[in-house]
Image (cartoon, grey):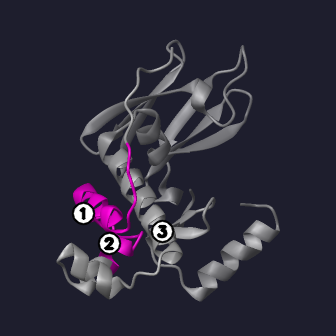
Amino acid sequence: MPKIRRGGRFVLKWDLERDSVMKGSASRRVRKLIVELQAEGLL
Amino acid sequence: MKVRSVVFNNRRKDFTIRLGASSYRYPYVRLERPPAPGDHVVSAHVDPEIGREGFSYVLASGAEGTVHGEQVLDYNKDPRYRREVLLYELTIEAQQRLSAIPLSRREIARRMGTSAAQVCRLFDQTNTRKSVDEMLRLLGVLECEVQFSVRAKSA
């Protein structure tokens, strides 16, 4: 369950199995980045 | 939770991590790339790149890796961490159940004797400030049976 940070500050924690936010909130930009990383097989 | 310090012990083949006020062990065998026979850890430090919530280590072979504090809490079966995971899983179950039965949130609130805002709070999986009791009550209203099982650890 990866955590996303910006400049060392916590942004969100993401559940890869269920594709949902566990903690924090996901902006559209962050969701898009997650989808891109999954498509590239990096997540 | 921030990692305050990390110490490695190549003889015991584990790390000792101070997380908050508690101290935990994390064995090398749980690492993503455990050191091969003859290899060993040469350094370990609290990693600022992950907000000091974990640590990174370097092996004599040059391989590097990172361990998040939550992996340490999970391995040590920390009750606060397990409570958070349990609440999250109960919430996801409640969300799935809600989409499968014809009950409105307002009706659920009425049956629970609480407000619709409180019900929304219970359905929010990012909210960790709710209690297991409240979630069990919600799942009861959603006509779910929750079972906990306790069994001896396998060797």
- Residue at (49, 14) in percent of width and height: B12
C-alpha distance separating marks 1 and 2:
8 Å
- Does the image show residue B8? no
Regarding mark 2 in the picture, which secondary structure is present there? Answer: helix
C-alpha distance separating marks 3 and 1:
16 Å
Percent of width and height locating residue B134: 24, 63
Please check the rendered image and state whether residue B126 is part of the magenta-colored stretch, yes or no. yes
Residue B145 vs residue A40, the one in the foreground:
B145
Regarding mark 3 in the picture, which secondary structure is present there? Answer: helix
Amino acid bearing label 1: Glu
- Does the image show residue A38? yes
Amino acid bearing label 2: Leu
C-alpha distance separating marks 2 and 3:
13 Å
Q: Write down the residue under mark 1.
A: B134
Please check the rendered image and state whether residue A16 is part of the magenta-colored stretch, yes or no. no
Judged left or right of residue B19, residue B61 is right
Regarding mark 1 in the picture, which secondary structure is present there? Answer: helix
Image vertical order of residue B45 relative to residue A37, above or below: above
- Residue at (36, 51) in percent of width and height: B2
Judged left or right of residue B141, residue A17 is right
Q: Write down the residue under mark 2.
A: B122
Chain under disc 1: B
Examine the image and state in which quarter residue B108 appears: bottom left
Tell me which label, 2 or 3, sits earlier in the chain.
Answer: 3
Residue B97 tag number: 3
Tag 1 and tag 2, C-beta contact below 8 Å: yes
Tag 3 and tag 1, C-beta contact below 8 Å: no
Residue B116 vs residue A15, the one in the foreground:
B116
Percent of width and height locating residue B116: 27, 85
Amino acid bearing label 3: Arg
Magenta extent: B120-147
